[in-house]
Amino acid sequence: MSEDNASSENIQANMSEDNTSPVLDTDGIGLDFDCMKKVLSEALGYPVGNNDPILMVGALLNSFLGEVQKVHEIHENASKAVMGKQTAKYIDAVKNTTDQLGEFLKNASVAAIRDIFEKHNLALEKQTLNSRWCAGIIAISALLDAAVYFIVR
């Protein structure tokens, strides 16, 4: 009984004074072992030693968080690439439309100007619709990729 109290006092002495925020591991992902021991000690009601097998779960979860972070980075880069391509297409469409507008304005009447603006509006609506479809496909792809990753893992 006195050994349990001594161990508990030893753990209390090693805890940080800021009990409100968890201490992140050195790479910024997951909890460090001291924080895991503190949380487990509070949850289980007995001190957790340095060699307690329950800390392996924390190590595994920290490793898993690192892998999830890598997947997020891959998705971020892929999304940037797709959105970059879509933006380039949009810029090209706007440039083509403005070039056509410039040509037609030289010889345009009011009716011709209305026709040009209608065509321009249709092109913009089509581009907006295409961008929404692209965003939806990217979102579904990311969700499916994450689901497959977690199922295979």
Image (tube, helix red, strand yellow):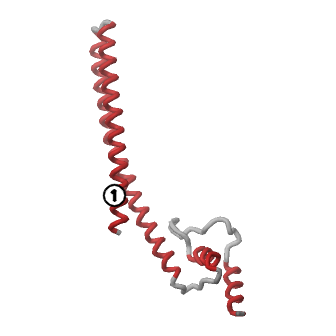
Closer to the camera in the image, 18 or 136: 136
Rendered residue at 34%/17% (across/down): 117
Rendered residue at 64%/65% (across/down): 21
Q: Position of residue 81 (x, y in %)?
A: 33, 47
Number of numbered labels in the structure image = 1
Q: Position of residue 101 (x, y in %)?
A: 30, 18
- Badge 1 crowding class, 10 Å Cα cut-off, few under 14, some 14 to 19, many 20 or more, is some
Q: Is residue 104 above or below residue 24?
A: above
Q: Is residue 23 above or below residue 97?
A: below
Quick one: quadrant of the C terminus? bottom left
Q: Quadrant of residue 74?
A: bottom left
Rendered residue at 34%/56% (across/down): 144
Closer to the camera in the image, 84 or 9: 9
Pointer 1: what residue? Answer: 145
Indicate left or right for 61 with 110 as reference.
Answer: right
Q: Secondary structure at mark 1?
A: helix
Indicate left or right for 81 with 34 as reference.
Answer: left
Query: For the view shown, which residue lies furthest in the bottom direction?
Result: 2
Q: Is residue 117 above or below residue 107?
A: below
Quick one: quadrant of the N terminus? bottom right
Q: Quadrant of residue 20?
A: bottom right
Q: Mark 1 belongs to which amino acid?
A: Asp
Q: Position of residue 93 (x, y in %)?
A: 30, 29
Query: For the view shown, which residue lies furthest in the top direction?
Result: 109
Q: Position of residue 2 (x, y in %)?
A: 72, 93
Closer to the camera in the image, 140 or 99: 140
Indicate left or right for 59 with 96 as reference.
Answer: right
Q: Quadrant of residue 39?
A: bottom right
Rendered residue at 33%/12% (across/down): 114
